[in-house]
Amino acid sequence: MKVHVSATSRHLVLRAASGELLPGALTRALVDNGVTGGWVRASGVLENVELRALDSEAGVQGPPRKLGGRAHVIALEGSVGIVRGALDVGMRVLLARETDSGLQTLAGEIVSARVVALEAIVTVFDDLALTREVDGDAGVALIASAIATESATRRAPAAPMAQAPTAAAYAPPPAPSAPAASAWSDAAAVSSQVEKQAEREAYRPAPLRSMTASASAQSSVTSAVPQRIARPQVADDDGLLPEAGDSVEHFAFGTGDVVKSDGDRLHIRVGKEGKIREIALEMLKVTPLANDGEKRRFRLERKL
């Protein structure tokens, strides 16, 4: 069994506008937000759905079937990855609708659909770029391989903290000449205008190292992999922050060791099993404690 570990992730909360078409609107929103690997979950109401399912005798996906009227999306989920250099989203769905003969449930993979109302959450693996391929035995598209991307955080300098930002720093970027983005993109603005501006300035290409992907898969993914931006350091009143090698006492996870610091985020190893947890410092109060020998110690509490 292949295992791909992601230590850095974020979540996009999306809301589609009525009339938008799947999968195109969703794919564009994910591309706009730098997604190259993740998992999507959604629910809502769709119409004009084209659905296909596995042909049990042929062992491949059957032809698309068109559904008239509207259907309630009870559950929709699937992997997000790259196919032949372009982002691809799997949308396996369970639908329900009332008919003359009673309640009807349908399941399969969405080929296309028109949105009546739809909400979605996408878990983004920022340190992985996934590829999706049709499995030869199963006949369905699944995650085939992963490439670990090196975060740009270590190379980009932290934003200066000595001087407060001016009003101009919060001004939105100039409007593009292209048509306005869809409501998916608007709803996916999960960071502030400051972070968006910093992303345009701090973007730098980063080398990739192969985990399980073939050389051809690497070349198709490399051109589509964006880099994670460097976020400002989150300093407490005393200016001290935990770094790799320090010990922390987290209010929820208990005592752990810092294995990585991204400025405003920490990766800590906790528990007997040594599970890695990623935490954001912006919502925590950081209090230095007495050192344990050569190791610095900090208490991480919720900000009141």
Image (cartoon, rainbow, N blue to C red):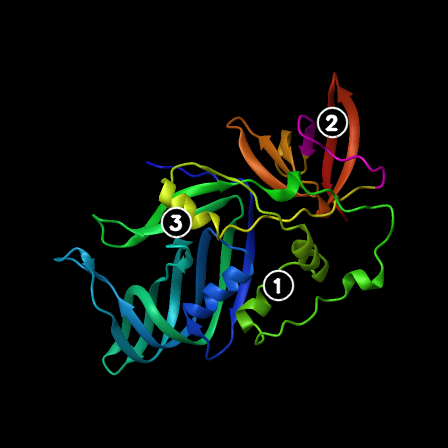
Q: Residue 189: which disc? A: 1
Q: Is residue 222 magenta?
A: no
Q: Earlier in the sequence, mark 3 or mark 1?
A: 3
Q: Mark 2, mark 3: which one is toward the viewer? A: 3
Instruction: Please tell me in which quadrant of the rendered image residue 281 appears.
Output: top right
Under tag 3, what secondary structure?
Answer: strand
Which residue bears the numbered disc 3? 131
Q: What residue lies at 74% left-to-right and 27% top-to-bottom?
A: 297
Region rendered in magenta: 237-249
Which residue bears the numbered disc 2? 297
Query: Could you tell me residue 209's position as x and y percent?
Result: 48, 37
Say which of 179 and 237 sits in front. Answer: 179
Asked if the residue at tag 1 contacts the one at tag 2, i.e. Cβ–Cβ closer than 8 Å, the answer is: no
The overriding secondary structure of the stretch rendered in magenta is loop
Say which of 132 and 278 sits in front. Answer: 132
Q: Earlier in the sequence, mark 2 or mark 1?
A: 1
Residue 256 in the image: above or below residue 35: above
